[in-house]
Image: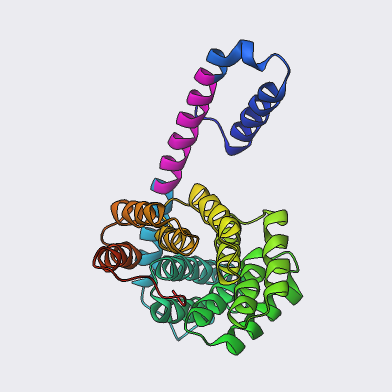
Amino acid sequence: MPDSSAQLRSRASALASRLAAPGAAAERERLKGELATLYRSIEFELAELATVKQDALALIEKWKTLPESSQHPLPMADARTVVLADHLGASTYIEKGWHQISVGDAVGAEASLNRALELAPGDIQAEALLGWARMLQEKYDDAMLLFQQVLLRDPHNSLARVNVGYTCLKKGIFGEAIEHLSRVIRLDNDRKATLYAHFYLGLVYLERDMYDDAQAFFRKALGLGPNLIEAYYELGRAHWFGGEQDRAREAWREGFTANKFSPWGKRCAEMLETVESGGAPLRSG
């Protein structure tokens, strides 16, 4: 039988201990084989979960086709079923909203996440992402209200806090931005938030003309999320303004190659064309 997630975590923890042990070098090849086996097991588990998820989404869509009855109130058990289905439906819109944020469609994301909150009022993840979508449209005051509501209920919510940090950056409050973003990195309890905390810190240091620090954070962000093509674009700018024009071109070329069809991949290509024709990036990005 495939390992459960708990078993996989246990195996990973055991391997971490062995890698940290003094005799790890003597076990190098054996550890390599066991790590490869663990990775394949995780990939199998993820594939299985993806299949189950699709099956569950299909069931939700099938449930939506059932006719509504206005003649009798729902029994308690059925009411719970509808609430569950609403939350599952909300999760579909939450996932869609996150995807739209990641590809730069903040307006579409806002619509999806509003729909998620209609299905699951008070869902903390939907609220945090909705604040993010509004923030990307420069609706900073509306976004901050949502982030503050989330943080009042969950002070360790890194998704809300990372975007408080970004909002502080956009308002020029660099000290507070660094404080919020550094706290997210220390907490490290949400992968997306940790990724964007590194990226946003890169933007903070780029804004302050601290190019080496900016480059380090952009590269760390790309290590955590190679599909964050925007980080290639900003890394190129950090190299360019730091006097490393060849490395800037290399970063933009890598960004375009990584995803030629994304908006930021296209911006990398446009920037390459601009500098090759004698132009230069704008300070404002």
Q: Position of residue 19 (x, y in %)?
A: 66, 23
Residue stretch in magenta: 32-50
Lateral position of residue 219 relative to residue 57, left or right = right
Q: Residue at x 64, y 25 (%)?
A: 15
Q: Position of residue 44 (x, y in %)?
A: 43, 35
Q: Position of residue 64 (x, y in %)?
A: 38, 71
Does 34 appear in magenta? yes
Q: Position of residue 277 (x, y in %)?
A: 23, 67
Q: Residue at x 58, y 86 (%)?
A: 140
- Residue at the far top: name it: 26
Of 91 and 162, the residue lying toward us:
162
130 lies above or below 231? below
Of 79 and 244, the residue lying toward us:
244
Q: Residue at x 37, y 53 (%)?
A: 246
Please identify the quarter of the rendering in which residue 131 is found: bottom right
99 lies above or below 168? above
Please identify the quarter of the rendering in which residue 63 is found: bottom left
Please identify the quarter of the rendering in which residue 162 is found: bottom right
131 lies above or below 260? below
Lateral position of residue 182 relative to residue 41, left or right = right
Of 246 and 137, the residue lying toward us:
246
